[in-house]
Image: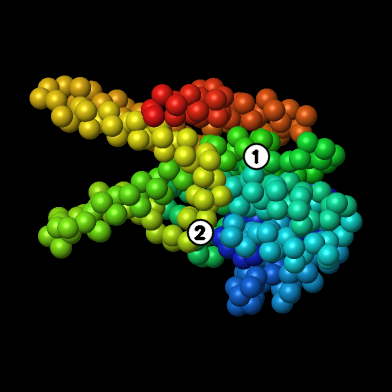
Amino acid sequence: MNFKRVAIIGVNCISVSIALKLKEQKEPPEIVGYDGEAVAADLARSMGAFDRAERKPGRACQGADLVIVTVPLSAIRDTFAAIGPHLEPGCLVTDTAPLKAPVMRWAKETLPRNVYFAGGHPVPNPALVGFDPLEGLDEASADLLVEALYFFTTPGDLPNGDAFADLAVALDAHPYFIDATEHDGLHAGVEGLPDLLAVALLRATVGAPGWEEMRKLAGRSFAAAANAADSGDERRITVFLNRENVLLHLNILLGELIRLRDLLSQDDPEPLEETFAAAAEGRDGWIQERERGMWTKERVFSKESMPALGQQVSQMLFGGSLTRRLRERSDRSR
């Protein structure tokens, strides 16, 4: 990795972890940070993540040959617009947002043509981080992204995708190039759909008659199922921006709910028992796979192999072409 100066725009657990790891390089780059909350940037500097902190995002980007934007999804477009005039010609720009299609569109609309952008989404190794969300800076670590899966989405004409792969390798992560639409389709099933389920559950219970008495019985199972409704603003924005993919999964879910309703209307308990058993088996298999770590052993993928990689991810998680299969299932469930 030959970066001399890295700008990190936005302070959170992921960005500070990236900075701490880069500082461990044999020839570490100078790292300049910025956050809208100056206290957060100063705290990251005191932790050794930043060499200095700037009070304006544009100033932080001056002279940088790599810029990593780690602000919330809702702030990315405005951040791109703010830093665009200050980017060095030829510098690399990436982000860490959970959706990629809208970010790729915003980058094309706002960033200058003389810089190179690739969307990024680092996913920590589940065997190392568990299920709890990574939030506070006290959870930041130079080793947080060791064996992580680092998704990259690039425009078709990007000449130096290998430089982004080098960034992932420097973090001891697995770079994985994938089409932006494919990535967001995967995200919809495991993030967007649970968010909507949590909202529906709460509206059907907390907002329903009888909740005053019902709440006396609500415990861990209810809390776990409703947990995805926390931090609603950013989740709502993510679901809305990815709504086409989320709708495909939602239609499939509606079909499954109707099937469960039909099973409950029968006097025979065996079909329902079989459904519960099959679901439990699927969940147990997923948990066991997750505890073993990430889903791929490959280290670096070239930009030329991106289409095959997008297909590989969907086959790995869903057994085939994601969009085609979801549309077929969605049509059948209607």
**199, 114: nearer the viewer:** 199
Instruction: Tell me which amino acid carries mark 1.
Output: Ala
Q: Quadrant of residue 30?
A: bottom right
Residue 180's mark? 1
Left or right: residue 164 compared with residue 231: right
Left or right: residue 3 compared with residue 173: right
Residue 149 image position (x, y, % from top left)? 60, 40
Q: Quadrant of the C terminus?
A: top left
Instruction: Tell me which amino acid carries mark 2.
Output: Glu
**154, 286: nearer the viewer:** 154
Q: CA distance from mark 2 to mark 1?
A: 20 Å
Residue at the image point whose x is 59% and y is 38% from the top = 183
The residue at which mark 2 appears reads as 234
Residue 280 appearing in the image: no
**19, 61: nearer the viewer:** 61
Residue at the image point whose x is 66% and y is 35% from the top = 178
Crowding near the residue tagged with mark 1, few <14, some 14–19, many ≥20 C-alpha atoms within 10 Å: many
Residue at the image point whose x is 64% and y is 44% from the top = 101
Residue at the image point whose x is 89% and y is 56% from the top = 89
- For the rendered model, the colour scheme is rainbow
Q: Quadrant of residue 251?
A: top left
* SS label for mark 2: helix
